[in-house]
């Protein structure tokens, strides 16, 4: 069973940067499609970014140009570099993994990101 653990969240001022990490264990990480999602209080969970086995990437419009998803298969880790953060980026960020491009079977517990204005 694949387990995912996020880290790197915190409090940052608007315009600042954070890098989230998600460490995977219990499976073959290089065979997993990975993604990041977020959920703000009172809102539904929304897609942020995903990365394929060959490192092709896809972003939500809200993330394009500011966020970068990457993976290090040697470290079983996926990252989300977030720059130019805005208060509306405040949310719990979740890492997800799956064996199909658009189907995520495994989820982390989340890490909180708070952006102050």
Image (cartoon, rainbow, N blue to C red):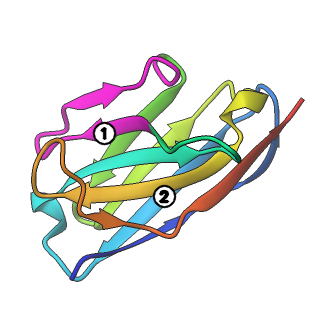
Q: Which mark is residue 39?
A: none
In the picture provided, is 90 more to the left or to the right than 108? right
Residue located at (24% from left, 55% from top): 104
Would residue 8 be visible to someone looking at this image? no
Q: Earlier in the sequence, mark 1 or mark 2?
A: 2
The answer to whether residue 19 is above or below residue 48 is below
Residue 93 visible to the viewer: yes
Stretch of the chain drawn in magenta: 47-64
In the image, residue 5 above or below residue 77: below
Question: Where residue 76 sits in the image (x, y, percent)?
Answer: 28, 67
Q: In which quarter of the image is the N terminus?
A: bottom left
Which residue position holds label 2? 21
Residue of label 1: 50
12 left or right of 100 in image = right
> Which residue shows up at 23% across the image and 63% down it?
105
> Is 55 placed above or below 15 here?
below
Front residue of this view, candidates 102 and 71: 102
Give the percent coordinates (x, y) of residue 111: 61, 61
* Rendered location of residue 114, percent (x, y): 77, 46
Foreground residue, 58 or 84?
A: 58
């Amino acid at each position: 069973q694949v387990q995912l653990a996020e880290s790197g969240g915190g409090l940052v001022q608007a315009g600042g940067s954070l890098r989230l990490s998600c460490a995977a264990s219990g499976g073959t990480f290089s065979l997993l499609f990975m993604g990041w999602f977020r959920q703000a209080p009172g809102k539904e969970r929304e897609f942020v970014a995903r990365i394929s086995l060959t490192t092709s990437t896809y972003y939500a419009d809200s993330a394009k140009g500011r966020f970068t998803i990457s993976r290090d298969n040697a470290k079983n880790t996926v990252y989300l570099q977030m720059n130019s953060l805005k208060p509306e980026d405040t949310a719990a960020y979740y890492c997800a993994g799956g064996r199909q491009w658009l189907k995520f079977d495994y989820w982390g517990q989340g890490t909180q990101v708070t952006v102050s204005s």
